[in-house]
Image: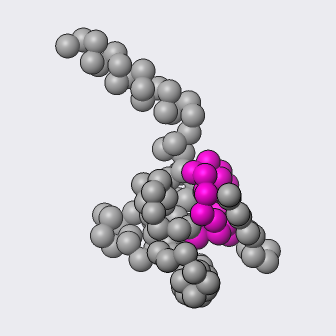
Amino acid sequence: MYEEYFIGKRNRMIGAGPEGKRLSAMASGKPVIAYGRGGALETIVSYNQQVKMEQLAPTGLFFYEQNVDSLIDAVELFCKFEKKFDPVAIRNHALQWDREIFKNKIKENIFEKLKL
């Protein structure tokens, strides 16, 4: 089951569920705090990983254990670095998974393969 929480007026998203929810939040320029497994690892640039990932702008943070302490640590880290998140960069990152862009990429790939 999916849970999402919005904290205060900041509208950051915390969740561990369907990819579409995280991408929707990021498409709105909101950083996310997500469980660091599965699809989240492919779509979120975690603040503490950005140096390793070619200086991409961070789009959120991960918590790696499904317990209260891990989540609290992630929220505290988020609060510490909150101003480092750029809503425009977060939105632009999320647009990689926009439905129309995805369709166009698939078409291009199919046409490219058919030429062979």
Quarter location, residue 90? bottom right
The image shows a total of numbered marks equal to 0
Residue beneath the point at 61% across and 57% down: 17
- The residue sitting at 57% across, 81% down in the picture is 67
The structure's colour scheme is one colour
Q: Residue furthest left?
A: 116
Is 102 placed left or right of 14 in the picture? left
If the image is split into quadrants, where does the C terminus sit?
Answer: top left
Image spot of residue 45 (x, y percent): 45, 64
Picture coordinates of residue 104, whole percent (x, y): 47, 26
Q: With respect to residue 116, does 60 lie above or below?
A: below
User: In screen coordinates, is 12 left or right of 69?
Assistant: right
Q: Image quadrant for the N terminus?
A: bottom right
Where is residue 58 drawn, in percent x and y? 47, 67
* Residue 46, position as x, y percentages in the image: 46, 69
Specify the quadrant of the image occupied by residue 72: bottom right
Q: Does residue 105 appear in the picture of this structure? A: yes
Most distant residue in the right direction: 9
Left or right position of 51 against 61? left
Q: Which residues are magenta?
A: 12-33
Q: Compared with residue 15, is residue 47 higher up or lower down, i.e. above or below?
A: below
Residue depicted at 42% across the width and 21% down the height:
107
Q: Is residue 71 magenta?
A: no
- Residue visible at 38% across and 70% down in the picture: 50
In the rendered structure, does residue 24 fall within the stretch colored magenta? yes
Compared to residue 108, the image places residue 14 above or below, namely below
